[in-house]
Each structure stands twice: as structure tokens, then as C-alpha cells.
Image: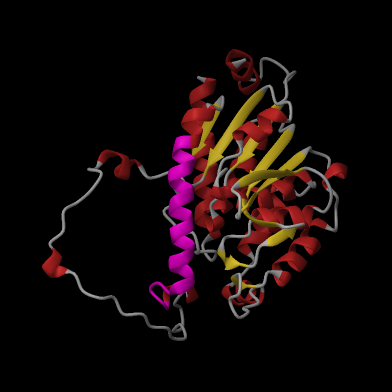
Amino acid sequence: MDNRFRLVLQGKAKQDFKIGLALGAGAAKGFAHIGVLKALEESGVRVDMIAGSSMGAIIGGSYAAGLSPDTLLEIALNSNWIDVLHLLDPVFPTRGFIDGQKIKAFLEDLYGNKKIEDLPIPFAATTVDILKGDLYVINQGSLANAARASSSIPILFNPMSFGDRILVDGGMIDPVPIDVVRSMGADYIIAVNVLAFPDSMNQKETFTYLHGDDLESSKSTWRIPRSNEPWYTAGKPNLAEIAHETVILSMALIAATQVEIAQPDVLINVSTGLAAWNFLEAEIAIEKGYEETKKELERIKN
């Protein structure tokens, strides 16, 4: 199959097999998926099915619904920090800091109230019952609800529910849903891990020694951002950002193990260098996803 894929990339054969795309979790890092999709299209790769977790579900669902990479790029780059804040509806944190109704409304507007079973490209999103740790795959019904459930980061967002199940971000135990897209009937799997650690981290020592006398209590502050200062840096970091980065770090460690075990045919590791909460610099993540995909496809092609 690897040789057949190589011939497709070389333009010497038609794609007569089904390619499944597993798009991983990663919050703002997941904007890289837009660059991945653009690079795949330019290389003549036809995506036949998609499984996504968290941001991978949002971007993957958009592509499955017929939105082009260029359209997704335009949506991502035309947002500013005020637009991002308008999507947040803070509530007294009973189950999450953010209610999520505005985000759901945004997704419904983005998808046009589409049903998953009616999409041009077969699609599935993952979510997790936080009470029992069970993984669920959503492959029918409201695309907006599926994406909302799959991206419900614990502590930050109020989770969705299904009966007595409390559904949170699929990335909690399935950050790169390789086995899900394999179960959908893919012959060849391309997996995208946007939580990949940079090469510099893989090469350094696993830990560093500190002296206890040099440690001190950190101080938490919040202020309105100054002009030309990104809003997400004002807390440096605040409670929500600490909670978010904690979850993302756990997902990244799981993802690193998961891709080793699940063994996709092609693995595209993307290290964006961005904080997971940095939704304002989507262009960096998109370009990184594009570059890494082009590099990997060129390696296979040659």
C-alpha cells in the first residue's frame, strides 16, 4: 500500500484505495489541521473519511461538511481577540468556567445545522465519559453537537451529557483517533498529531535538578491587556490557562504513546510552538501544519 500511495503522489497512479485521516486534539494548536488539509489537496490526495478529536473534530467536521481549506483559513485569520471573547460565556463554575452555548451557536452557523450521516465525507468525532473513562464515537446526528462534545475541555467548558454520561473532550484518552478511522474502513491512514513535542525536547535530559531554597510562591494577577498586547498573556498564566495547559500536557503524553501503538501508515507530527490557548496566531499553526505535511509527503514521494 505504501508503494501505491507513493505512485499517487508521483502522479503515476490513480487513488484506488480509501484514505482515512485522523485529526488530533490540541486546542489552538489544531489550526495546523487547516494547513495539513491544504497540503494534502495540493498533492492530489483524496481524503475518503475523517475521525477527529477536539479541535481535530471541529476542523475535520468542517472539511467533511464541504468547507475548503481556503475557506477555513479565511475564517481562522479573520478572527480577532474581541471575536474570540464573544464566543466565551463565563458561568459560575459548577462543571466548567465557560457554558459553551455561544460556541455551539458558532458551530451551528459554521456547519449549517448539518447531520453527520449526510456529509459528503464520512466523519466521526470522539468524546469521553469523564465518570467512567469510556470512549464514545459520534457518527450520526448533529455535527455541531458532536464537535461541541468532542472539544469540551474538562474544567474550562461545561460538558455535554447523554443520559447519565458526562461527555468531555475526546482527546482525554484518544487524542489522535487512529483506531476510529481504521474502524471506518480506511485502507491507508494518515494521522496528524499537533501535540508533538519539539525535537529539542526529545533530545534533552528527561529532568533537571533544582535547589529547594530557590523556590518561592508564585503570584497570580489579572489585568486588562495593554494595547498591542495579546489578551491571553495578561494573566501570565491565569487559573483557566493553567487548567487548560495541564489537560493539554496530559493529552500530549498520551498522544506520543498512542501513535507508537496504533501505527498509522503516515504520521505527521506538528510542533507549532504556540500555547494551546493562543487562538490569535492561527496563521503560525496553519503554516506549520502545511510545511510539515509537504515535507512528509515529499519524503514518501521520493
Q: Position of residue 56 (x, y in %)?
A: 62, 48
Q: Say if residue 44 shows up in the picture.
A: no
Residue at position x 78%, y 42% in the image? 139
Q: Say if residue 106 shows up in the picture.
A: yes
Residue at position x 77%, y 68% in the image? 105
Please indicate whether residue 266 sits to the left or right of residue 19 in the image: left
Q: Position of residue 287 (x, y in %)?
A: 52, 49
| The residue positioned farthest toward the right in the image shown | 118
State whether the magenta stretch is mostly helix, strand or loop: helix
Q: In what quadrant of the picture does the N terminus appear?
A: top right
Query: Bounds of the magenta span?
Result: 234-257
Residue at position x 58%, y 53% in the image? 31
Q: Position of residue 35 (x, y in %)?
A: 59, 46
Q: Is residue 296 above or below residue 115?
A: above
Residue at position x 45%, y 47% in the image? 252
Tally of numbered discs: 0
Task: Check residue 227 for magenta coloring.
Answer: no
Q: Is residue 166 above or below residue 14?
A: below
Colour scheme shown: secondary structure
In front: 259, or 212?
212
Question: Can you tell which quarter of the image residue 134 is in?
Answer: top right
Q: Is residue 207 above or below residue 296?
A: below
Q: Position of residue 69 (x, y in %)?
A: 68, 48
